[in-house]
Amino acid sequence: MTEPADHILLLAGTREARLLAKKLVETFPDVRITASFAGAVDNLPDLGVPTRVGGFGGVAGLTDYLVNEKVTLLVDATHPFAAQMSGNAVFAARSLNLPLIRLERPAWTPESGDLWQSVVSLGEAADALPAQARAFLAIGRKDLHRFTHRTDIFALARMIEPPELPLPGHWQLVLGRPPLSASEEIALFRKHRITHVVAKNSGGRRSHAKIEAARQLGLPVIMVDRPKLAETELATSVEDALRKINLEIVSDF
Ligand code: NAP
């Protein structure tokens, strides 16, 4: 059997990556597709394509992988805050002159009634919380350590998997994915008498309920801006990515 001419490496870890993998299989049945996960969470979703798990070993490791596996197109559908992986993808693709498409959902923008304070980093977000605040932290487990010195506040931290470090004794942990409805978030915020919401500007619908809940309750949101990433071709939706991938695959012949 001859090997397919094209091999797409899809850097995954988001809902969009999952949707895109499904569309890619349907649209390009003759193309080899490999999805890649960091392995940060235990229960990885089935993307319906062969999958590899774990870091590549920086730019050099990724470059080796791309060469050894004869990758012809790199698609970065990682989270907008996965800046290290996205940066590595740009540098590896540039060094090999390989096409790279980054699928990046649009950032949230404030609406009437939103009380946002934009900050450029999680460290700045931690500094922005006033003493005695009752903060809801929706920032993931990896970055929790940037807040744990703030023992003068209460925090309710929500994440999918437990943190590696212990939380200050009076803080509370909620394990699980965010609910889709603002009413569930409102109930949670009321129960814990939350006064501030800290969020990364992830964009998308999946984790937007907390922002709507904050608006409805008149709570300030400390919104962490996205990291600046090296420039590459951008797609803003799964459909847009599919169109751009189609152009790359067709122009191969
Ligand atoms: P990161 O800081 O940009 O990446 C750290 C390292 O993890 C990378 O240098 C790479 O290791 C490895 N890595 C990351 N994504 C990978 C992938 N898809 N396949 C193989 N290796 C990967 O990323 P992060 O913020 O820790 O996020 C890790 C994963 O969780 C990402 O895939 C992202 O899409 C997902 N995620 C992140 C967030 C968030 O808020 N950061 C939220 C939801 C989902 P090597 O250098 O060894 O190659």
Image: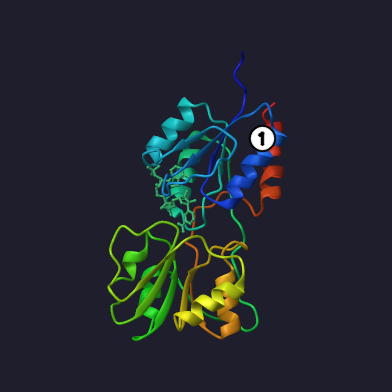
Return the x and y of residue 183 as percentages of the image width and height.
60, 75
Q: Is mark 1 within 8 Å of ligand 1?
A: no
Residue 106 placement, left or right of 196: right
Residue 128 placement, left or right of 101: left
Query: Which quadrant holds residue 111?
Result: bottom right
Q: What residue appears at the point 28 percent right and 72 percent down from the top-left corner? A: 168
Q: Name the residue nearer the viewer: 13 or 209.
A: 209
Residue 117 in sight in this render: no
Q: Residues within 10 Å of mark 1 (few under 14, many from 20)?
A: some
Return the x and y of residue 132 as percentages of the image width and height.
35, 86
Quadrant containing the C terminus is: top right
Q: Name the residue nearer the viewer: 99 or 151.
A: 151
Return the x and y of residue 5 as percentages of the image width and height.
62, 23
Query: Which quadrant holds residue 202?
Result: bottom right
Reading the image, the residue beneath label 1 is 25
123 over 153 or under it: above or below: above
225 over 64 or under it: above or below: below
Residue 110 placement, left or right of 130: right
Residue 176 placement, left or right of 58: right
